Amino acid sequence: MQWQFADKRLEKIYDKVEQKTRLSKEDGLLLFETFDLNGVGMLANKVRERLHGKKAFYIYNQHINYTNICKNRCLFCAYAVDKGEASSYSWDIKEIEKRLMDRIDEPINELHIVGGLNPDLPFSYFTDLLKAVKKIRPNAKIKAFTCVEIDYLSNLSGLSVDETIAALKEAGLDMMPGGGAEVMSERVRKKLFPKKMGKERWLEIMEAVHRAGIPSNATILYGHIETIEERVEHLILLRELQDKTYMLNKTALSKTPFERKGGFSAFIPLAFHSANTKLLHIPSTTAFDDLKMVAISRLMLDNFPHIKAYWVMIGEKLAQVALNYGADDLDGTIIEERITHTAGAKSAKGLTREFMEDMIKSAGFTPIERDSFYGEVNVKH
Ligand code: V47
Ligand code: SF4
């Protein structure tokens, strides 16, 4: 029997989901406009179950935010400071080695490494950093640097974008996180992150990254001044790039457990947190908005294998609920997250593997510990 939608307009989207037809911009707008959250969630869950059944993924990871000095100073960012400010820091390679060694007994599978744009760091710092991490953790994958950092490093080194990516890959870069695109709207960029690259450059660099055989994630920063239309346009731009890199990388990137269809692996909606930013007047996102963002991402991004509910941003409890609204991944155990916690996130600093597994099981899903490429690890049969 067909689901009884509170908002009958969703019936035509149900038919499209059933027939695996791509949703249009108008469909995306309707999904954001409707108050029928459970209807939207049911549709997203249908897609989620088709792709992953009852599996829910997480990873045992460690974040390394190597410096908080950043010359961009985006208005939404609480993490970045100017050089000389009391809270500024920049870790040298020895400090990073120490932080890795402090946790060497833990079964960490992925190092997530990002930082600000600190003019004092030479290009060699970045290749040395990757090599040092690989030496200490040869079996873990390195997911590092956003397109913003790649663009910066290309300018710093005088290398082309392709050469920069090749040099970083050679030094140990395995994958890139999402981040940096924020919301692909020139209107929003001018107001909130005027010093950061625009959407054309972000898409151009991401395409080059995928062409080089390096997979990445993608994100959206939502819940500030963006419109619903800008959110939908952002999702469509990502979907189009995913189609394009599939064509480019048919052989290189499709041989993964889930037959990845392009360079993008997961999409992560990031809920804006205003504490300690210049946008303090903007209220937090609501649970309604957070769940809808997850669900609509699942529905619009039909060519993305994974949607993450990032518990650091929306809290452990809502992330668990989001598993029924289209999300199939809860990201990682993470012990030390700085970017969102500086902006006032109330979530825990880190979760144990047991907590993560219990959270997934009690929502009716099967926990799967994964590696960076969604290969299953520590499988207990
Ligand atoms: O690009 C900055 C966001 C991003 C705030 O790929 C903020 O697996 C909320 O990209 N409130 C970096 N968000 C984080 C990121 C990420 C996180 C987790 C997993 C992955 C992945 C990627 O953090 C930035 C920006 O969009 N951000 N300030 C803030 N006040
Ligand atoms: Fe710098 Fe990134 Fe923060 Fe912008 S979001 S100020 S680029 S660290």
Image: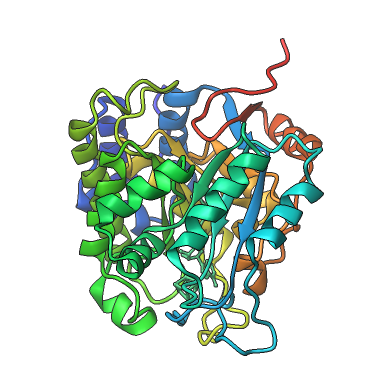
The image quadrant that residue 183 belongs to is bottom left
Q: Residue at x 26, y 27 (%)?
A: 20
Relative depth, front residue between 266 and 17: 266
Can you give x and y, in whole percent of width and height, for residue 361 in the image? 72, 29
Visible in this render: residue 30? Answer: no
Relative depth, front residue between 64 and 90: 90
Visible in this render: residue 183? Answer: yes
Can you give x and y, in whole percent of width and height, for residue 40 in the image? 42, 44
User: In the rendered view, does 59 fall on the left or right side of 260?
Assistant: right
Q: Residue at x 48, y 53 (%)?
A: 127
User: In the rendered view, does 79 fall on the left or right side of 35?
Assistant: right
User: In the rendered view, does 226 fall on the left or right side of 207?
Assistant: right
The relative height of residue 116 versus residue 88 in the rendered view (above or below) is: above
Can you give x and y, in whole percent of width and height, for residue 290 in the image? 52, 57
Q: In the rendered picture of this protein, how many numbered marks are placed on residues?
A: 0
The image quadrant that residue 158 belongs to is bottom left
Task: Give the position of the C terminus as an image quadrant.
Answer: top right
User: In the rendered view, does 14 fall on the left or right side of 306?
Assistant: left
Can you give x and y, in whole percent of width and height, for residue 159 in the image? 28, 60
Q: Residue furthest top?
A: 381
Q: Residue at x 21, y 38 (%)?
A: 243
Relative depth, front residue between 374 and 275: 374
The relative height of residue 104 versus residue 149 in the rendered view (above or below) is: above
Relative depth, front residue between 121 and 84: 121
Task: Give the position of the N terminus as an image quadrant.
Answer: top left
